[in-house]
Image (cartoon, coloured by chain):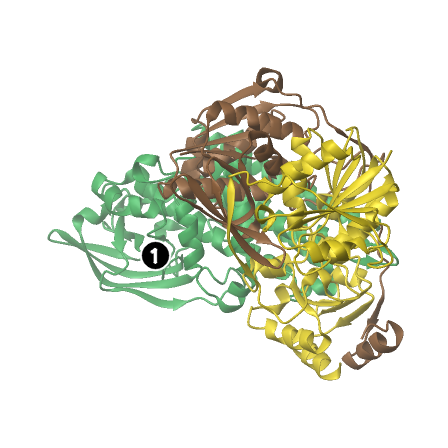
Amino acid sequence: MKILVAVKRVVDYNVKVRVKADGTGVETANVKMSMNPFDEIAVEEAVRLKEAGKATEIVVVSVGPTQAQETLRTALAMGADRAILVQHDGETQSLGVAKALKALAEKEQPGLVILGKQAIDDDANQTGQMLAALLGWAQGTFASKVVPAEGTVAVTREIDGGLETVELKLPAVVTTDLRLNEPRYASLPNIMKAKKKPLEVVDAVGLGVDLTPRLKTLKVVEPAKRAGGIKVGSVEELVAKLKTEARVI
Amino acid sequence: MLITEEQAMIRDMARAFARERLAPGAAERDRTSRFPAEELREMGGLGLLGMLVPEEWGGAGTDVISYVLAIEEIAAGDGAISTIMSVHNSVGCAPILKFGAEAQKERYLRAMATGQMLGAFCLTEPQAGSDASALKTRAVRDGDHYVISGAKQFITNGRHAGVALVFAVTDPVAGKKGISAFLVPTDTPGYTVARLEHKLGQRCSDTAQIVLDNVRVPADAVLGEPGQGYRIALANLEGGRIGIAAQSVGMAQAAFEAARDYARQRTSMGVAIIEHQAVAFRLADMATRIEAARQLVLHAAALRQAGLPCLKEASMAKLFASEMAERVCSDAIQTFGGYGYVDDFPVERIYRDVRVCQIYEGTSDIQKLVISRNL
Amino acid sequence: MTTILVIAEPSAEGVKAPTLTTLGAAAKLGGAVHVLVLGQGVAGVADATAKIAGVAKVLVADAAELAHGLAENVAPLVVGLVKSGGYSHVLAPSTTFGKNVAPRVAALLDVAQISDITGVESPDTFTRPIYAGNAIATVQSLDPVKVATVRGTAFEAVQATGGSAAVEAVSGAADAGLSTFVGNEVSKSERPELTSARVIVSGGRGMQSGDNFHLLEALADKLGAAVGASRAAVDAGFVPNDYQVGQTGKIVAPELYIAVGISGAIQHLAGMKDSKVIVAINKDEEAPIFQIADYGLVADLFKAVPELTGQV
């Protein structure tokens, strides 16, 4: 079974983003970029499935600017076999990305597509579901366990209040949640090997896909700050305040 | 200096590993002096303990620039572990790679390159530090064996190494040409850890005094040729010094980042203290010094990678970076005020950890000597 | 004309809180509000939904294929209703159900989906948090149908009574033949669910171990509270993922939120800062959590929490 994994280049999760003064977005110039953490989990899951003999080839794809090649190289260093970049310099939104991934899925015919459940920049949590819809495939979102079998895959999902297991007909789309696995660090020998692995660059026009944004961002502002409160000196004082002042207990 | 995409990936991997796997336990290891066996096992798996060893011997086969970038990041996570890494790579693996016979490489280098075996470098003696020609340890030929006796001081990895590269005098009248290097498995009878030092910093990296009491090794334990020891000892001085310089930069960077983040968060007189010019300017100076040192390190590494002479540049990098680092760590403590002096924050530990960078692999005075002789 | 289809949070037991807050967002849009109640054996829930204030019509899809809310079966049904009913808006709660289904509906309609809206500026313009709540974006949808998920904590719940909507059965539910429900493992707890609890006691890395969470459980039991955790505590393996409060976990807004041994990373604050009263207990007086706490106590949690449990 071939696995297609989609990854996104985002502002590194350790960076504290700052809203631009003109309100058009957040500052991304000279900011460290990395692979979306949920997508690292997706790559790791694919590599583990391959190591377990459940997958034969891992193709990692991204939709984004030239620099997203670095993100793809990281996935190759983690163990993916080859990479495809749909080069696009403008804003990407979930629906357009899902259409690009659909075109690639039709070409590559994977048995499974694995993506992160959301990217930590736009926090949309849509692309996997949209891709499944466009392909007419089953979707296993927010996965904490993925067990492929003959023609199906059992996916345990993180849902409100617990876990749910569904059985999906293959091919299917899976999106990853935090507990699915702990991604490995790419080892130095594998980083050295990654540069020799194939990385193909295509564009949206070539795929026949329209990436024009459907949502227009009018402005971006900092969240309202919550005013700080007071320090109390003891548990007694805290209990008194909660009872008589805040009246919540 | 601009680095390649691959070098950036190596740096980023080392950074992520150091931040997530090393930094969280650094304070606890400092308190308990616990040897980081598990952390080193992981580093071995990632190729960090055989960076400059070619793939055919199980290493990662990276270039020198990637190596110093990785050392810097590991040092930012835990300075003591960066010393273990630096010693193992530069004076553990490198001499065997350069001078070792095939059988020696097969026996030691393959295991060392993946971190399954650690190396120690036994040159310094109680009475012989930077003056390597004053060695007292003797190796006496006995048939097809050598019998080694003496004491070695300040041996990093002395307790946990699987193999020690021991320098001993084989021909007392031949001076520097009478020194030979021996690969001594540390389970050889007579190899004794006489004491573990209690140090100002870098406490999870053990520093041992080793007593060699009639240690009997076969003649094929000689690394290179008999009498080649002094040359072997000096062969990777530049590499070792560039490594220490990179460690200094990494520790300084970690202290700086802690101070910067604190200055952004801590308020006084109604604003974050970074808004006070005295604090902001001090941070600007710290960042500038660190960057200057980093460029010296990268330049020396680039020369070394190109196979060009770099003795002076390596000494300059080590001298400048190690002295810069003490100053930057001190400034970081100052930024924290009283909190910098207590162990709630990492800067006091980094300050202690980084101090030895001005001492080991040639003190600052020795570096000045080298530089002044090459003016 | 604005006509809104709200997909109710599925439950055979009754009207769920996220349905009421999603209706709160619908009320801000203005226009006729229809609610789709789906599931198996949900006639009673449909009747209860019809009593919610401001609901014009309840559509009830009662079928075995919808029993477990599988997106593959739910989405085509919703798409059919949108096309036949001419809805301008489809709203679903930002629950794991809504987040699973709404993007699938949007893609089938070839429209964008707006995730996790926290404000309604106009019928086509919404606010939503991005970058883990570090920024708030105002976005305008250029599509004919607006499909959005609604962050419950950002809107007032509508009154559960006072309405008298017509209930209309809809047919057309089918098994897409793509997925089957195997089973679920609901966290067994006598305590309330995090997202609906009136009081939450949460622990962070400062708890030091999973065992120490019994201190919080004892306090929670005294207060009738739910127990939550920061991502740091989940990552450290102290408690399961479904305890997690934060941008990538659950977004909560209880009347009282007690943060114990939580430093207050932005990703955590994004998940709980809308709580009415926030209490922080931490030994590090510089912890950022104190900047948003109404009542801060600088103390060793291992002493303060048992003391607090004894006094409430």
Left or right of A124: which side holds C140? right
Q: Give whichever of A86, B188 is nearer the camera.
A: A86
Q: Is residue C106 above or below residue B252?
A: above
Q: In the rendered image of this protein, which colour is used for chain C?
A: yellow
Left or right of A146: which side holds C77? right
Please identify the quarter of the rendering in which residue A97 is found: top right
| Residue B95 location (% of width, % of height) | 33, 42
Q: In the rendered image of this protein, which colour is used for chain A?
A: brown
| Residue A31 location (% of width, % of height) | 68, 37
| Residue C281 location (% of width, % of height) | 73, 70
Look at the numbered disc 1 and give the secondary structure of its residue: loop
Please identify the quarter of the rendering in which residue A55 is found: top left
Q: Is residue B272 above or below residue C225?
A: above
Q: Give whichever of C81, B287 is nearer the camera.
A: C81
Residue for point 46% across, 49% down:
B361
In this rendering, does residue A118 appear at all?
A: no
Residue for point 30% across, 39% down:
B57
In this rendering, does residue B115 appear at all?
A: yes
Residue occupied by mark 1: B161
Q: Is residue C83 above or below residue C261?
A: above
Q: Give whichever of A91, C170 is nearer the camera.
A: C170
| Residue B98 location (% of width, % of height) | 32, 37
For disc 1, the neighbor class at 10 Å (few under 14, some 14 to 19, many from 20) is: many
- Indicate the chain coloured green by its letter: B
- Furthest toward the bottom, the residue is C310
Left or right of B372: which side holds C109? right
Q: Is residue A155 above or below residue A134?
A: below
Q: Give whichever of B161, C49 is nearer the camera.
A: C49
Q: Tell me the quarter of the image containing the C terminus of chain B.
A: top right
